[in-house]
Image (cartoon, helix red, strand yellow):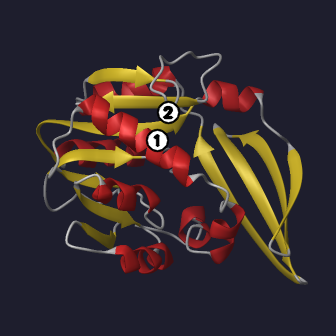
C-alpha cells in the first residue's frame, strides 16, 4: 500500500520528526482528553482506539482515566518507543489506518491533524469507512483537524528553527490542494530533507466525506475548550461523528 514516495513513511519514522515537534504540550493534550471524554460521557472501562498515536501521549493519559486504550501508528519507531508504557489497559501496535480493524471499539480518536495525508480522496474515504466499521453501536469517532482556512491565511512561508544543536529550515506553500511543508535539516553538517503535507479540507469538504461514508455529524468544535467552531477565528475543526 505504501510507496517510496509516501512522505509519511520516512518522516514520521525519523527521529528528527520528534525533535522538531518536541514542544507539543502534554498539558494541552490532557486538557483536551478530559474535556472530550467528559462531554461524550464515555464510561470508565470503555475501549478506545487512538490512531495514529505517535509515541502515545494521548493514549497513555486516556489509560490513566480508566479506559482500555489501543494506540496504533504506521511508524515502527514510534510504536517501539510507546511500548514501554504498555500495561493491562494500554497496548500499542503498528497499523496503517487505510487497513480495516479487526475488532470494534467504544470510540475512535483521530487527533492532532492526523487526517488528509493522502493524494487520493478514496484513501481518505477508506480511512473514514474503517473508523465507522470499527465502532460498536451508538459509539463515536472524533476527528481533530486544523481549521484549514485560518491556517492558509496565517501561513508562514519560511522560518528557521535551532533545536538541540540542529537547524531546521522550513518553507510552506500551497500546492495542488495541499499545504506542503519542506523541512531541510542540518545536523552538524549532515544534511537531510523531508516534507509533510496536509490536504486543504474545509468544513464543506469533510462534511461531504462524512455523508459519503454514512457518518452522522453530531458536534463541531473550534478548540480544545470545546467552544463552537467559527470558520474565521477557530484554530481547530473538531468533529464528533456517529
Is residue 209 left or right of 182 when viewed as pictured? Answer: left
Quarter of the picture holding the N terminus: bottom left
**Residue holding disc 1:** 31
From this view, report whether residue 126 is shown above or below residue 187. above
**Residue holding disc 2:** 224
Residue at (42, 55) in percent of width and height: 58
From this view, report whether residue 205 is shown above or below residue 162. above
Residue at (63, 50) in percent of width and height: 197
* Mark 1 element type: helix
Q: Position of residue 180 (x, y in %)?
A: 70, 48
Q: Position of residue 14 (x, y in %)?
A: 62, 75
Q: Are marks 1 and 2 in contact (CB under 8 Å)?
A: yes
Is residue 165 left or right of 233 when viewed as pictured? Answer: right
| Disc number lying in front (1 or 2) | 1
Number of marks: 2
Camera-side residue of 181 and 162: 162
* Res 119 visible: no
Camera-side residue of 49 and 29: 29
* Mark 2 element type: loop
Camera-side residue of 93 and 60: 60
Residue at (27, 54) in percent of width and height: 49
Is residue 24 left or right of 90 when viewed as pictured? Answer: right
From this view, report whether residue 196 is shown above or below residue 2. above
Q: Write down the quadrant of residue 210 in the picture.
A: top left
Q: Write down the quadrant of residue 178 in the picture.
A: top right
Q: Position of residue 29 (x, y in %)?
A: 49, 47
Quarter of the picture holding the C terminus: top left
Is residue 155 left or right of 235 when viewed as pictured? Answer: right
Q: Which mark sits nearer the N-terminus, 1 or 2? A: 1
Local packing at callout 1 (Cα closer than 10 Å; few below 14, some 14-19, many 20+) is few
The CA span between labels 1 and 2 is 7 Å
Residue extending farthest left? 137
Amino acid at each position: 500500500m505504501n510507496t517510496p514516495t509516501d512522505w509519511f513513511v520516512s518522516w514520521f519514522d525519523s527521529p528528527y520528526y520528534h525533535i522538531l515537534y518536541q514542544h507539543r504540550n502534554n498539558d494541552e493534550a490532557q486538557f483536551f482528553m478530559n474535556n472530550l471524554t467528559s462531554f461524550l460521557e464515555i464510561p470508565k472501562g470503555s475501549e478506545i482506539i487512538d490512531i495514529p498515536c505517535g509515541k502515545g501521549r494521548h493514549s497513555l493519559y486516556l489509560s490513566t482515566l480508566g479506559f482500555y486504550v489501543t494506540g496504533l501508528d504506521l511508524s515502527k519507531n514510534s510504536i517501539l518507543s510507546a511500548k514501554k508504557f504498555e500495561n493491562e489497559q494500554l497496548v500499542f501496535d503498528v497499523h496503517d489506518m487505510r487497513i480495516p480493524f479487526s475488532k470494534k471499539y467504544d470510540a475512535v480518536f483521530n487527533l492532532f491533524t492526523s487526517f488528509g495525508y493522502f493524494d487520493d480522496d478514496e484513501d481518505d474515504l477508506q480511512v473514514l469507512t474503517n473508523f465507522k466499521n470499527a465502532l460498536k453501536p451508538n459509539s463515536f469517532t472524533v476527528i481533530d483537524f486544523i481549521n484549514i482556512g485560518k491556517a492558509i491565511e496565517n501561513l508562514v512561508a519560511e522560518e528557521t528553527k535551532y533545536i538541540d544543536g540542529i537547524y531546521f529550515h522550513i518553507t510552506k506553500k500551497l500546492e495542488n490542494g495541499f499545504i506542503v511543508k519542506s523541512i531541510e535539516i542540518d545536523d552538524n553538517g549532515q544534511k537531510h530533507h523531508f516534507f509533510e503535507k496536509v490536504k486543504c479540507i474545509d468544513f464543506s469538504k469533510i462534511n461531504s466525506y462524512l455523508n459519503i461514508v454514512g457518518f452522522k455529524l453530531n458536534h463541531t468544535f473550534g478548540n480544545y475548550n470545546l467552544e463552537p467552531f467559527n470558520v474565521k477565528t477557530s484554530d481547530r475543526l473538531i468533529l464528533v461523528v456517529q
